[in-house]
Image (cartoon, helix red, strand yellow):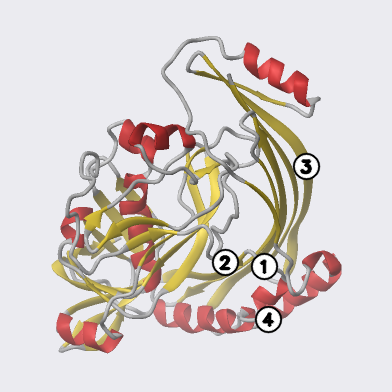
Amino acid sequence: MFYDVRRIESYSLKISIENGRVEKVKFDESRGKAFRVLKNGFWGYFVGDVDDREGIYLAEKNAIGKGDVNVLNVSSGGKFTLKPKEDFRDVSVEEKVEFLRDVEKNLKGDKIVSTSVTYFENVRRFSYYDSNGNEVFYEIPRIGLIVSAVAKDRTLQFYSKRIMKPAGLEALKGAYDIANEVVDVVTKLVNANAPPSGDMNVVADSSLAGVFIHEAFGHAVEGDHVLQGASVLANKLGQKVADESVNIYDDPTLREFGFYPFDDEGVKAEKRTIVENGILKDFLHSRETALKFNSKAGNSRAEGLKFPIVRMSNTYLDRGQYKFDELLEIAKDGVYLVGSRGGETNPATGYFQFNAQYGYLIEGGELTEMIRDVSLSGYTLEILKNIKIGCELEFDPGFCGKVDQLVPVSDGSPHILIKALVGGS
């Protein structure tokens, strides 16, 4: 019988300011334990702040069936504490509110009709041990700032930028710069034209390209999706799935928003090679799926005390050889798209559809007029087999949702040049 015990303590603060008024100051502090027992190939689970022996006993009682589940035996252990340069716990709520008001003051303009600044901070303390003798601990602070504005002229438009890092207040040094960028973009966007439509050359910025890699490709390499037959990449290990210039990694050790030193099954974090020179090398795994694929674990994550499942961390397309201007020259005509406003993907078929935040026409290899409300769609594997990749890698943070669980992640990519279907959103 295998068992493991997670103890999680969490502290968080959220402050929202809208149109100059403090709308919300929310403080949360929680702690609890989650117990898993694997018996007769079936998981028993219990959540409660009880003595460990009692928790394990109650989880075992919940292992009421029989199955074929087993887990990879790993050897892991250690402690890690991320110490921020400027600890947000040393700064009062009043000082934070004053800082946010100062940031929002930069969101001014004749066309601006609504503004918002949202701040959050969180500290997660994670303790884990299992029946194999593994024992780990970490403490990680995370901080975030989301700056947004709505402007109105010929159309009504919304634009936002964010900073999210495993860090302290030092991560927010660029807050005033992103506020200025929000104003600059949204006041131009209200008078931008609708996009052209059809199959065309698309240069995607690092943010949109990163979302493509995460949503359209990353979810398809999650081991549980593969086992469920819900991945277009099933049965393609060792095969060419992309152009030889394509290298895709998932790396929880990077100090981006998806950083963690150990996953929620106590496995030490490691960089994973997913695609190397266009060849599919591996999937992402929990201890359960890793055993079935004869691979490595380390990508099992959970929101709070929920049951751990296979998740991404910092997933990225690595650098290529092209400068941005070179991608525009190769494209000649088409569109340059910036940022993402969400969309949908189907890992089983590889189909995706995203909405960009805005863009520009590319005419004769040059950026010309601004465009708005743009959508982008296509099939993942077709896109990756005909792609040109820029040389400057950037990451974009966010929260990824799966099975009603949100975890912090980052998507990374250089600019890319692809051919896809473009239309209005």
**Mark 3 nearby-residue class (10 Å; few <14, some 14–19, many ≥20):** few
| Circle 2 SS class | loop
Mark 3 or 2 closer to N-term? 3
Q: Is residue 237 above or below residue 65?
A: below
Mark 4 or 3 closer to N-term? 3
Q: CA distance from mark 4 to mark 3?
A: 34 Å
- At 26% from the left and 63% from the top, the residue drawn is 424
Q: Nearer the viewer, mark 4 or mark 3?
A: 3
Residue type marked 3:
Ser
Name the residue tied to disc 2. 255
**Quadrant where the C terminus is found in the figure:** bottom left
Tag 1 and tag 4, C-beta contact below 8 Å: no
- At 55% from the left and 69% from the top, the residue drawn is 162
Q: CA distance from mark 1 to mark 2?
A: 9 Å
Q: Which disc number belongs to residue 30?
A: 3
- At 51% from the left and 70% from the top, the residue drawn is 160
Q: Which disc number belongs to residue 376?
A: none
Q: Quadrant of residue 133?
A: top right
Mark 1 or 3 closer to N-term? 3
Residue type marked 2:
Arg
Q: CA distance from mark 1 to mark 3?
A: 20 Å
Residue type marked 1:
Ala
Q: Nearer the viewer, mark 1 or mark 4?
A: 1
Q: CA distance from mark 4 to mark 2?
A: 30 Å
Name the residue tied to disc 4. 105
Q: Position of residue 399 (x, y in %)?
A: 53, 54
Q: Which disc number belongs to residue 167?
A: 1
**Quadrant where the N terminus is found in the figure:** top right
Q: Quadrant of residue 257?
A: bottom right
| Circle 3 SS class | strand
Q: Is residue 124 above or below residue 168?
A: above
